[in-house]
Amino acid sequence: MTFTSPLLDAHTAELYRSLVTAGVGRVADRIASADRPFTGITPGRLAEEVSAVDLDRPLGDPTAALDELDHLYLRDAVYFHHPRYLAHLNCPVAIPALLGEAVLSAVNSSVDTWDQSAGGTLIERRLIDWTAGRLGLGPAADGVFTSGGTQSNLQALLLAREEACRRADAPARTDVLPRLRVLASACGHFSVVKAARLLGLGEDAVIGVPCDRDRRMRPGALARELDRCRRQGLLPMAVVATAGTTDFGSIDPLPEIAEICVSADVWLHVDAAYGCGLLVSRRRHLLDGVERADSVTVDYHKSFFQPVSSSAVLVRDRAALRHVTYHADYLNPARSAAQGLPNQVDKSLQTTRRFDALKLWLTLRITGADAVGELFDAVIDRAAEAWALLDPDPRFEVVVRPRLSTLVFRYAPPGVSDDALDQANLHAAAALSASGAAVVATTVVDGRHHLKFTLLNPRTTVVDVADVLDLLAGHARAYLGDDLAHAS
Ligand SMILES: *Cc1c(COP(=O)(O)O)cnc(C)c1O
């Protein structure tokens, strides 16, 4: 393969075909042969090799570049399709979505204005309508694809802030902003706090509402916090309920929370970044109440098995999206709106934007929504089986029975101090990852280090889970050594 020009055009279409095919072949080989989720490579070792590359001396030859890439990246990448990758919410991906990825980047549509996207805009709009329909948001619903749950949450809270400012009817925004409050469960996602900062709210703008033992927001506590805000002259701008918390997969009681938001007249945002897969699962009822939200975050790149990025923010009332509309002469929205041209840029925080919707489109058109739902149901079933294994195991303590597909637990044999156990659990996770045999996550619960499984791979079996628990216990035991001997 030789390059006359790097650009894809009528003269190079065949080169494009063979080069991308060669690249896909490399990935397919690695996927087919990965015997571990990770090689355990350290940043130090890899950094040296990456630094040694002279970026001002191109290799010219694509095969040489692919060889180099195989060495620098593919060989030591983290492979989410491996059944013993059990750490984070990044998923194995649906093949139809990869087809979409290949198509959308080569055509390079930008779903900002109609004249940069054409049919892409219509496809994205159909998927937004489809998602809003599954959510039950009603006839005025709308939304837009985003880069991820963080951006979806930011946009939803921006809309809520603008609505709150409008309704506060105060002479100056500067009087309103410091008084705005967002109420989210103490188990909610940190992106809510980040969004509050970006939106110019005060440091204390996000009020953490206490959770029950199952890590679900307590509606009574929410009602009390809302009352307290009112009494103190504060303006509750939004309640953020989480449908699938990142650590526990817990789902806040949406119907009760919706009821409270209606009587308090507060915007309800539901963060279903993780739980959105329930929309297509046989457990759809777990999302009951979501239809009453003012806005919803969904991350297709978590529980719909789509490659990063694929997310959306949905709103009950499309009029709310006007808060992100901006009139730029060169994009000419005023004139194109008059001509009836649909411009997605009017609904988005981004301008140039990937046509990520195509991945979900091809997934729905090739395998369908039920197939996606079955994958998510399978990992939820697996988490329940893993819990049944873990709960009676005297080596471990497990925090809650899973609702979705995460398990938070801790190696905790009797007689060892909490501090020693903290170190042993951290060590076990790190040692396991360094060995490459499996990857698990860690988190902190009530000030104590815990281990976490996030199951998103239907090919992970209970045997995988049992083996990984043995490996973790082995690493922790080895770390504790004498401590453990004295304890028992
Ligand atoms: C992952 C997650 C987010 C953030 O989404 P990104 O796509 O990673 O930006 C927000 N909320 C919840 C509950 C999540 O699990």
Image: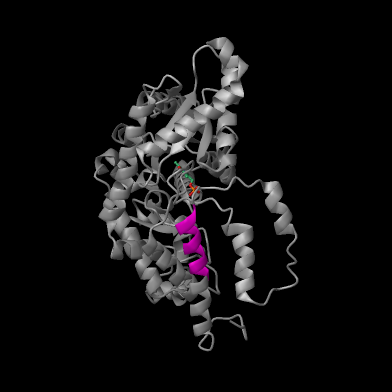
Would residue 485 be counted in the magenta stretch? no
| Residue under the point 36% across and 43% down | 275
**Is residue 420 depicted above or below 382 in this figure?**
above
- In the rendered image, residue 453, in percent from the top left (x then y), is placed at 45, 36
| Residue under the point 71% across and 47% down | 44
Total numbered badges shown on the rendered structure? 0
- In the rendered image, residue 128, in percent from the top left (x then y), is placed at 35, 59
State the residue in front, 129 or 48. Answer: 48
3 on left or right of 168? right
Q: Is residue 233 visible?
A: no
Quarter holding the N terminus is bottom right
State the residue in front, 75 or 283. Answer: 75
* Magenta stretch bounds: 23-34
Magenta stretch: dominant SS? helix
- In the rendered image, residue 69, in percent from the top left (x then y), is placed at 61, 63
- In the rendered image, residue 22, in percent from the top left (x then y), is placed at 51, 72
**Is residue 332 depicted above or below 9 in this figure?**
above
What kind of colouring is applied to the model shown?
Answer: one colour
| Residue under the point 47% across and 48% down | 90
457 on left or right of 365? right
Q: Is residue 89 visible?
A: yes
| Residue under the point 29% across and 50% down | 373
**Is residue 350 depicted above or below 313 in this figure?**
below
Question: Outermost residue, bottom direction?
Answer: 11
Q: Quadrant of residue 266?
A: top left
433 on left or right of 280? right
